[in-house]
Amino acid sequence: MAADSVSFGLRAGERLGVVGESGSGKSTLALAILRMIKPPGRIDAGEIWLDGVNLMTLSDEAMRRVRLARIALIPQGSMNSLNPVMRIKDQISDAWRDHGLAPSRRQVEERVRDLLESVGLRPEVAHMFPHELSGGMKQRACIAIAISLRPRVIIADEPTSALDVVVQKQVMETLARVQEDLGASVILVGHDMGLMAQFVDRLGVMYAGRLIEVSPVRDIFTQPLHPYTEMLIASLPSLEQKGTFRGIPGLIPLLRDLPPGCAFHPRCPHAVDRCRVEEPRLREIRPAGWAACHLR
Amino acid sequence: MTTLLEARRVTKVFGGGLFDRGPTLALDDFSLAIDGDRPSITAVVGESGSGKTTLSRLLLGLTAPTGGEVHYDGRDLQAMSRAEWRAFRRDVQVIFQDPYEVYNPFYRVDHVLTTPVAKFGLASSRAAARALIEDVLRAVGLRPEETLGRFPHQLSGGQRQRVMVARALLLKPRVILADEPVSMVDASLRATILASLRRMNAELGISIVYITHDLATAYQISDNIIVLYRGSVAEAGDVALVVKQPRHPYTQLLLSSIPQASAARTWMTENAVASAAVHDAPGAGCKFAARCPSVVSRCREAAPPLFQTDRHRVVSCYLHQNAP
């Protein structure tokens, strides 16, 4: 079970972050929203609602039309998801044809130019191949594809994990700008707490396939509710004070061999007997602040 | 001061062959000295393409410099006798970035620990070897009974990387070169591995060269820092000085680009800084000139040398040539 009973709501125009370490189920969650879990994996239960429609009830064909047009994905390492033998222009317009649009050649040229401009790429890029672009440029080209049908939701899965920090900042600024232009919501999936702190409005923290805390991002960094969130933040090296970071003892549990009760209890300094037997549910602890912890 | 490991004006050029687009200058006139008397942690920080990997290969003697020399204990690595080379390979240990690729999946993890014991004759009996291995595993926070006898895939990335640190410790080295040791390890385990490096420096007197792209961890564990930009030193010196009051425009750009994990949102509100253009500035001049917000005509004519701006810092930028 890679992601278990994860529930949250996403507001229009909101930036929601989902943070977790490797194996926490964050990428699975992103793919599940798009119903893109590959066999033998499957979505066992649950509902995904978008503007009043339960995506789980759609036919495969209807779901295919939702992807990109309503919910777009900027995949992990998306610089490698571009087709190496297709020009950028064709990769963008490919999606339009796939969604039943038949723009004329002139329309394609114009629309591609506008899209590239909106992500800060020069018009010449339209006629280039991916290998002619730098990592940051490829990532922006992927953003251009993702926004080409003006989606309501953009899911970005570690969109900058392979980029240098200077380029990362530029790519995130680009994403923020196009999101505001479209009025779309963003789900940013990743492991970088710094990036989350600076980009999202609300942050969900995943541990061992479960969402263990969801709070407005400012609250998370001033007063985290879950001990794991608190220790994760304390493990981050800061540029402010020296010698303040410390790791979380113990190991991340294997998903096929989870401890009983709260999955975090073997590493939690506050664990009590109840934590070892009963799994805590996500509850609203303070306004807009949700956590799955018996001690709250 | 006796210098233990030293790079003297090292330059490394790749390519330039018949079908190449031209030679690539991976490292340009680079110098570094690790003091043998006062063990320290020196961080080398740079983005991709800055020459970090080339530097680590040069310091390990895995590749020969095009110009300049790398010395260990006063001897040029390229001119060492067999016995000297053997001593060097024992005294200078390395921890690589990828804790997945360094293991042979067919061997138990014990293999990476027993091999150096056998090769360097570190123990006189099997029992002594076992005791030694258990000691170093405990030193990095691993329980020997949960580690030995397992195959690599049965350990997490963090555990594997700690076994690598333990392996380096086995040989009681004088220098450990850690090349991005935590970039593939999860956040919650990163701190533990870095703390063990810190402890090895403080308690065992091992000097550490920490090569990384991450300024925050460099700031946390090192004493000195060298900021590389495209094969050249942009700024170097005391880590607190460089991080708290960066002088080189590149160091400033790098620091302002790091998203900080705090409630204060300052990251995207700052004015967009220098462009990401990575085109080579053709010919001479400062390599950062094309992206520098404070560039003047002089920067494009000749590359700036390292100016001493404080007692414990040098900066390669004309803005600081008249520093006290």
Image: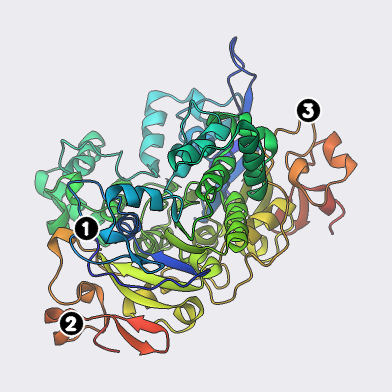
Q: Residues within 10 Å of mark 2 (few under 14, many from 20)?
A: many
The N terminus of chain A lies in which quarter of the figure? Answer: bottom left
Q: Secondary structure at mark 1?
A: loop
Q: Position of residue B86 (x, y in %)?
A: 36, 31
| x and y, in percent, of residue A177 in the image | 63, 59
Residue A32: x and y, percent?
30, 57
Q: CA distance from mark 2 to mark 1?
A: 28 Å
Q: Amino acid at mark 2?
A: Cys
User: According to the image, label 2 marks what residue?
Assistant: A275
Q: Which residue is mark 1?
A: A43
* Residue carrying label 3: B283
The label on residue B276 is: none
Q: Given the image, what chain letter belongs to the residue carrying mark 1?
A: A
A284 left or right, relative to A273: right
Instruction: Please tell me which residue is depicted at 37% across the width and 69% down the height of the picture.
Output: A52
Q: Can I make out residue A171 in this image?
A: yes
For residue A48, above or below residue A160: below
The residue shown at (46%, 32%) is A83
Q: Residue at x 39, y 62 (%)?
A: B187
Asked which secondary structure carries label 2, the reply is helix
The secondary structure type at the circle numbered 3 is: loop
Q: Amino acid at mark 1?
A: Ile
In this orientation, does residue A157 appear? Answer: no
Front tag of 1 and 3: 1
Q: Amino acid at mark 3?
A: Gly
Residue at 76 percent of width and 29 percent of height = B282
Q: Nearer the viewer, mark 2 or mark 3?
A: 2
